Image (spheres, rainbow, N blue to C red):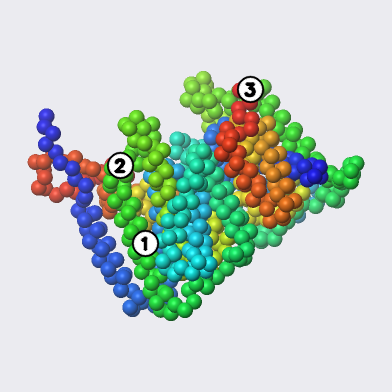
Amino acid sequence: MTTDVHIVRSTRTSRVALVVGLLATAGAATMPAWAESSWMREFVEIACYFVFALMWNLLAGYGGMVSIGQQAFFGLGGYGMLMLGNLAGVNPFVAIPIAALGGALIALPVSWVAFRLQGGYFAIGTWVIAEVFRLSFANMSSVGGGSGTSLIALRGIERAVRESLTFWIALAGVVLAIAGVYLFLRSKLGLALLAIRDSEVAAESQGVDVRRIKLWVYLAAAFGAAFAGALYFVGNLRISPDAAFSVNWTAFAIFMVVIGGIGRIEGPIVGALIFWALNKAFSDYGSWYLMGLGLIAIVVTIFFKQGLWGWLQQRWGWSLFPTTRWLVPSSAAHSTHEVPNAQHR
Amino acid sequence: MADTLIQGLLLGGLYCLFALGQSLMFGVMRLTNTAQGDFIVLAAFAAIAGLSVAAVGPWLIALLLLPVAFVFGYALQRHVLNGTLGRDPLPSLVVTFGLSIVIQNLLLQLFSADPRSIETAGLNTRSLALPGGIAIGVLPLVIFGVAIAATAGLQWLFGSTRLGRAFRAVSDDREIAELMGLDANKVYALATGIAFVLIAMAGVLQAMRTTVSPSDGPLLLLFAFEAVIIGGMGSFWGTFAGAMVLGLAQQIGFRLDPGWGIWVGHLVFLAVLVLRPQGLLPRTRG
């Protein structure tokens, strides 16, 4: 009878999460003053995995583009940063964002080829493209060919400065990646993307430009993956085609996203934490450990499609990063806006 | 030049065997098996393990492996993969990708990273001399013959048998086919069973012709996939043609520079994707 409703876009949990997240970030930012450098190095490494996984989640979980070739952009970011530093004399820290942008630019012509394929064919087609980049760099003697090369551009920068700067960039990268994906999904374009995920045909019939939005998501995911790659090899100091373009990057991203819960921002966060813990506890077991990761991914995909966070969300209605719009009658405006067991993703 | 072309076509014969199983699974249930290459390697190691236990010839082991592979494929589809099919390609991709990682690491644990091969009592070094100083290996020629026979056999199965009609029916419209009394899950399982027979043949012949090691799978998958896409989906002779194109491209690339063979193959694949995305012989089976 009445249209007297208003839109609620946050929950008490999400507001608490925002405050806790900001406090944790501020606390973490002081780490270079007191933490051991091995901790910071570990954080940088897991940050690269996480940003890469978050971008894979955006691509596959929201954009419906399941790629096994995102390592193409990870490697391009790494090599872009290294070439800017070693060959063009750019400060490697400055080179990180430039290399990320370069990755997104290269993703544009790549998309013309990759978008000819869909579904499972897209997945393997992107893998072939990543292999083309790997073999191309393996044949390029100015960056050491197949055996790779070292990041000599960092010579002359003091170790403590280098480690602190790398750490801060990693922290900023994590925060900006989460904030960027979150704000994008809450925007009008994000709404269109969610509509595409639920039904491409229905979204198109509502006037959503499916192709254009998918392209933007692909470019954004390439940007994030290239950033992660550039950052990783600033921390690692050494690059080779096999390490930079290894399919394992995407394999680990798939693992994190599937375990945590695909198509939700919390998924890769939870997944990265689990991956980090498993890695610490079991990575000494080598191939048995990798076999375990593969088996977990299979079992979760078949029996717990929503992942760990999806299950928690269904059970308790938690949502740290709500992208949903809830319509609430205005008469209830002054009561709390907790939405119990909301069926949303 | 003639030598390069002939070697390229013979290499294509092997790639055709890699690809036929993939083509069948694509065609019947739109399933992208990302563990295709790893299953080929698994079959090769199964044969190698069998030979180390039983003192029989490699061809007998290969023959014994085929029914085992069929049952394995049937059970895998029936109990694991059928549950992952649907509009969303993600579950089947993640499950087969997970299987790929499990198989690679299991083989690494059992057999170490050393490359292995199957001894064929000198067959792999014997060759026929052609005029013009060209030599053709007997084993590659046998493989080529098996590839032609397998392609023709699959085309006949698809086009002229009751089972083939069931394959085409569930491929066109699963729901209608089920209304007509077909059990789609069973038909899918039969298709995967047959695909695994082809995978087993490919694995044994690969190990006879060259070597296999546990980490080879992904590369074999990419070759299989490229052959299917170059050839055009839904046609086995298309897959055969695609494999020939890929074999030729790689052989010419190798001739230009030993580091370029696989790279040139990938580039030809991407070029076909841009210029003729429907492939060379799309849907000739009508």
Q: Chain of mark 3?
A: B
Distance of label 3 from label 2 (alpha carbons): 48 Å
Tell me the residue at 84%/44% (across/down): B136
- Confirm whether circles 1 and 2 share one chain: yes
- Lateral position of residue A180 relative to residue A283, left or right: left
Distance of label 3 from label 1 (alpha carbons): 58 Å
- Residue placed under numbered mark 2 in the picture: A191
Tell me the residue at 82%/49% (across/down): B124
- Residue placed under numbered mark 1 in the picture: A173
Distance of label 1 from label 2 (alpha carbons): 24 Å
- The amino acid marked with disc number 1 is Gly
| Residue B251 appearing in the image | yes
Classify B274 as above or below B255: above
- Confirm whether circles 3 and 1 share one chain: no
- Residue placed under numbered mark 3 in the picture: B162
Q: Earlier in the sequence, mark 1 or mark 2?
A: 1
Q: Nearer the viewer, residue A282 or A252?
A: A252
